[in-house]
């Protein structure tokens, strides 16, 4: 009888360890995925000053729009690393402002043909694609973690061991979901 009880306790402990390790893995995957978004957002932020300087040379009277982009870039970078919701809002505002910069470029044929601008635009487009892929990966990792945190039986261990749901990286405004159209 004691052997059966010992086996049941052993299976229960093994089961709890497996559930706990699954929660740890899901949390680490979500954190690693957020790091991927953060890296891509940093790459975009590093590209912005070059883009702004190139546009400034052609569109000096568009100073307020260009300053807004720099200000929004700085605000986005100032958001604490773990604050996904606030960072999402800040990055969405920055994306809108970048769309306005690209619209300014429409009015300047010399700028549209400028090799530096074209290279910066190509780089920005590539980074935006990487950000989109990183967002999908992050949201998938968050989904997996959130399912484990809320599902039985792993939810029995999630709460007591401090595992909590994470926030998805979402676009708040439906109009922001459309990519800015830049035509040459």
Image (cartoon, rainbow, N blue to C red):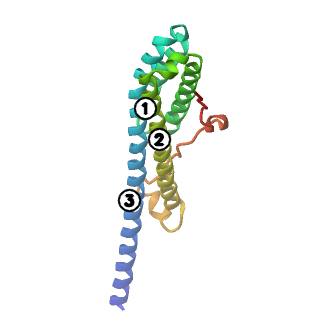
Q: Secondary structure at mark 1?
A: helix
Quadrant of res 157: bottom left
- Give the residue at the far bottom of this rendering: 1
**Which comes sooner in the sequence, label 2 or label 1?**
1
Q: Position of residue 129 (x, y in %)?
A: 49, 41
> Marks 3/2: CA distance?
23 Å
Q: Residue at x 42, y 16 (%)?
A: 53
Tell me the residue that label 1 is attached to: 44
Residue 12 image offset from top left, x and y in percent: 40, 76
Mark 2 touches mark 1? (CB < 8 Å): yes
**x, y percent for residue 181:** 61, 32
Residue 25 tag number = 3
Where disc 3 sits, the SS reads helix
Specify few, some or many for label 3: CA neighbours under 10 Å numbering under 14, 14-19, or 20 or more: some
**Residue 118 in sight here:** yes
Alpha carbon of mark 2 to alpha carbon of mark 1: how far?
A: 9 Å
Q: In the rendered view of the protein, which quadrant contains the C terminus?
A: top right
Neighbour tally class for label 2: few under 14, some 14-19, many 20 plus, Cα within 10 Å: many
Residue at numbered disc 2: 131
């Amino acid at each position: 009888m004691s052997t059966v009880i010992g086996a049941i306790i052993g299976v229960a402990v093994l089961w709890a360890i497996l559930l706990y390790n699954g929660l740890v893995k899901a949390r680490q995957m979500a954190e690693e995925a957020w790091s991927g978004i953060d890296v891509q957002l940093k790459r975009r932020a590093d590209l912005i000053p070059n883009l702004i300087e190139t546009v400034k040379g052609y569109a000096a009277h568009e100073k307020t729009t260009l300053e807004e982009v720099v200000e929004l870039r700085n605000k986005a970078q100032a958001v604490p690393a773990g604050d996904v919701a606030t960072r999402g809002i800040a990055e969405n505002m920055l994306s809108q402002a970048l769309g306005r910069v690209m619209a300014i470029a429409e009015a300047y044929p010399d700028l549209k043909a400028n090799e530096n601008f074209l290279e910066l635009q190509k780089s920005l487009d590539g980074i935006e694609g990487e950000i989109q892929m990183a967002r999908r990966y992050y949201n998938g990792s968050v989904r997996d973690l959130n399912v484990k945190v809320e599902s039985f039986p792993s939810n029995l261990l999630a709460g007591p061991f401090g595992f909590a749901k994470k926030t998805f990286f979402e676009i708040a405004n439906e109009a922001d979901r459309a990519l800015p159209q830049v035509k040459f």
